[in-house]
Amino acid sequence: MEEKPFPAWTCSVEQCLKEFNVSLGKGLSTYDVEKQRERYGWNELVKEKGKPLWRLVLEQFDDMLVKILLVAACISFILAYIHGSESGESGFEAYVEPLVIVLILVLNAIVGVWQESNAERALEALKEMQCESGKVLRDAYFVPDLPARLLVPGDIVELRVGDKVPADMRVAALKTTTFRVEQSSLTGEAMPVLKGTDPVFIEDCELQAKENMVFAGTTVVNGSCLCIVVSTGMNTEIGKIQKQIHEASQEESDTPLKKKLNEFGSRLSTAIGLVCLIVWVMNYKNFISWDVVDGSPTNIQFSFEKCTYYFKIAVALAVAAIPEGLPAVITTCLALGTRKMAQKNAIVRKLPSVETLGCTTVICSDKTGTLTTNQMSVSEFFTLGGKTAASRIFYVEGTTYDPKDGGIVDWTCYNMDANLQAMAEICAVCNDAGIYFDGRLYRATGLPTEAALKVLVEKMGVPDVKARDKIRDTQLASNYLIDSSAVKLGCCEWWMKRSKKVATLEFDRIRKSMSVIVREQSGCNRLLVKGAVESILERTLYVQLADGSLVPVDEPCRQLLLLKLLEMSSKGLRCLGLAYKDDLGEFSDYHAESHPAHKKLLDPACYSSIESDLVFVGVVGLRDPPRDEVHKAIEDCRGAGIKVMVITGDNKSTAEAICREINLFSTTEDLSRRSLTGKEFMALSSSQRMELLAKPGGKVFSRAEPTHKQEIVRMLKEMGEIVAMTGDGVNDAPALKLADIGIAMGIAGTEVAKEASDMVLADDNFSTIVSAVGEGRSIYNNMKAFIREAVVISSIDRYMISSNVGEVISIFLTAALGIPDCMIPVQLLWVNLVTDGPPATALGFNPADVDIMQKPPRRSDDALISSWVLLRYLVIGSYVGIATVGIFIIWYTQPSFMGLNLVSDGHTLVELSQLRNWGECSSWSNFTASPFMVAGGRTISFTNPCDYFSIGKVKAMTLSLSVLVAIEMFNSLNALSEDNSLIKMPPWRNPWLLVAMSVSFGLHCLILYVPFLSDVFNIVPLSLSEWILVILLSAPVILLEELLKLLGRRQRWIGKQKTE
């Protein structure tokens, strides 16, 4: 039975010491350490046993399409060997196709194994977060650098500024006034957290509420303390996260694309089997013959040799019908997509996630740093005016730490009144923050709120005109400095020179404020205070008016100030009250630690009395503002049918205010069933959770912990949603791993989050996700265009068997009609490898459809090729087959076509019945075939008239090949968009396709008009009238596809009207 963890946060320090039988003065004895280690083990994260390499490799072949390709490769090897044995040839070229298939499968397996090994990296990144050593009390002596691995529950550890916490520990005693820990990687909180020793009397509370606990992997940013180790190794919060990451990786399901390809493979295998059987049966007359006597078959003759020959032909057709290039085509298309996304600041770590993005139905987004800038800024401040009943509000623009980003709206107070001067002085001097530029962003050192106050001071300016001009000149000069990382805060420096800081009264939880004693230019000391507004008001006697006069605080004035505070807080602003005090009593002449009153500064209990009888100056409202572009991105999501859910560790009111501001919710919308804390959501029954998540519109979950995020993602996936989840902290890693698309933050994200993710945002921007979704949809469409090219146009092997609908139909027509072969293998191989390649590749550069983000996301169970699209492929493919065979027949049987004279070259016309029975030519009486001319003056002649159907078919074959190439070119234009007309999506939207078409057509002309190449490919040059014939038979493929697209759009419009 699993041991229940000790809830140290709910117990007093004495109870914790008793639980582990340890004292703060001596620590554990060596004997106790060994006993604890036997019970709890080593303080390290246990690496889960991963899959062996051989299993990872085998799993890459557990795919229907791959299995079909393996069978195809085996059959190709056998056929190549038999063909070589029969012909006496053993050339390497016979084995090219099976070797290519095997090579593609091997590369595919390598990529798959590499991607699966990425799962291990997230766990390795977690280990890197662990502390290596710590200062530990044992046997009454401090061991300065004890390896963290040796820690056991009950150990007494001393933590100082900069230390990384080695285990989950209970704060036992503070050695400084304040003690802060930066734990954003675990909780998502942007601000360092103040820790204390008082117990928390709620056992089932979130991590943020455990204010007397420090957690492994977090960092001390301020102060020093003694702690008691309560959890080690896998029992720590970071250990629990490792377990969750491992469990989430076990739950990973196939991507929508893989599911569709498996389905496609299953259907393909069935279709191939049927085609194989039909082709074999269609040729039965060639290996079975009989005479009919008195209505009964007699003299039945069976040729086993011919039977096996046609069986090989049928099997070869099956092999050729398998799109062996499809895995490579998909990988190429996804790789092109990753490049496009990288240009839009979305760095894809796992190729399949490119396509999965395209069918995303829900985006679960973090708030801090994704929807917001993760840079605190002052958005407004207020002070009293000329009397206590009047207030004045100033609005501030700018959302970053850049002092030049925005300003104060309608600011006319450069010659600041006394009240505004007091506000600027407090913001500048009661402040330990700094700002620097990292080459890309302005960043804060110290507390973000204090950095925002310094930016406000820079926007306010200084009251001295000469100093103001000098500061401006200095700032202009700083733009040309080589070291641009240092940000000169001229206004803050001016205030700090006037008011020299001599002592600091640190923040604590009781008085909820901090202050500094400064020496003014007059030689007098002044106390500058900032903190929680309600706390400061309780200790305030006077308020300062605009002209600097002081008036006592009466009840109406207090209510006015509290009402303004409520208004600002309702907007999601974090409010700070500002105050000062001139009459400092015994601290009036304080100057150094040697002063008699210094001992009071060492006792935090005295701080409240020092910060009493204050003069209230004003209130500053700060926030982490939403990014400018998020509002439009939310609208785009709404138009694209994507639900947005905000999951944040922040408090409920702040999260709701931001969500209203970005228009996820309207200002009047009731949020009772749209905004819940993580605990409120988990308290609901499973059916209620499902119902809540299924409702249309946005949702916000605040105070969310890792388990809450995982549960939300898991339930959404169970409902059939495709979930994209963003995160930056270690606490987000399990949910990132579990989501269909895990998206980590590139700037603020931890390495653990990045390694667990499928995609990393280089700019941490929500709008980048929305752009990536649009790009994912576009890539999926391009992939289908690739497949369309593969299915409708390309891929031929040495047996003259086509892998596409058009050429399969041409084979059926050729076999059914009994006419000579329209093309020979070398011609079809040229089409497959050379002329077909450039347009198919260029389709990967197709831009997104103009209306791509106005369509709802496709369902994850939608077929890769829907019934309607398959019908379109069959119609277009049928036309390809009919046109290819049709021009062959027309040349042999028709004197003219649509006004074009086809017999000007002197070739002999035959009846269709003769063409269909050309194999019986030798039995025809009086059959002759005249020599004919081809372009370039060459004459085609033959000694045996029957050679007219073999040697003489050279021009007919050239026409068939040219029609195939021309249709391929025209059909690639059709593939620019699956639904939109060429009028809406003109060819020049993808200039690479036009270039590719030119290259392919140029290559075709090259083999036509270069004598050596035309002999190799057994073709002849064409005249102008013959080219016109080719175009006449090829161009209608565009009109046919446009008609089909129109019917499809009308069908969808009718369906949409019915649903509405």
Image (spheres, rainbow, N blue to C red):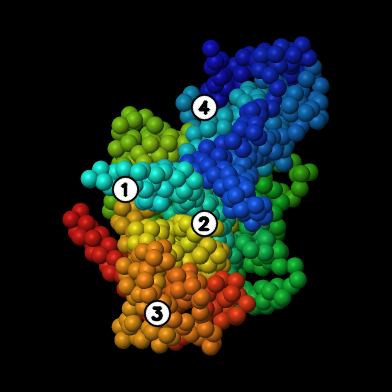
**Can you identify the residue that label 4 sits on?**
200
Circles 3 and 1, Cβ within 8 Å, touching? The answer is no
Choose between 497 and 519: the one closer to the eye.
497
Q: Secondary structure at mark 2?
A: loop
Q: Quadrant of residue 854?
A: bottom left
Question: How far apart are the alpha carbons under marks 3 and 1?
Answer: 34 Å
Residue at image x 72%, y 41%? 162
How crowded pointer 4 is (Cα within 10 Å; few <14, some 14-19, many 20+) is rated as: some
**Mark 3 vs mark 2: in front:** 3
Task: Give the mark nearest the N terminus, 2 or 4.
Answer: 4
Disc number placed over residue 799 in the picture, else none: 2
Looking at the rendered image, the disc whose residue lies closer to the viewer, 1 or 2, is 1
Callout 3: SS: loop
Q: CA distance from mark 3 to mark 2?
A: 29 Å
Q: Which residue is mark 3?
A: 908
Q: Earlier in the sequence, mark 1 or mark 4?
A: 4
Given the image, on which type of amino acid does mark 4 rest?
Val
Q: Secondary structure at mark 1?
A: strand
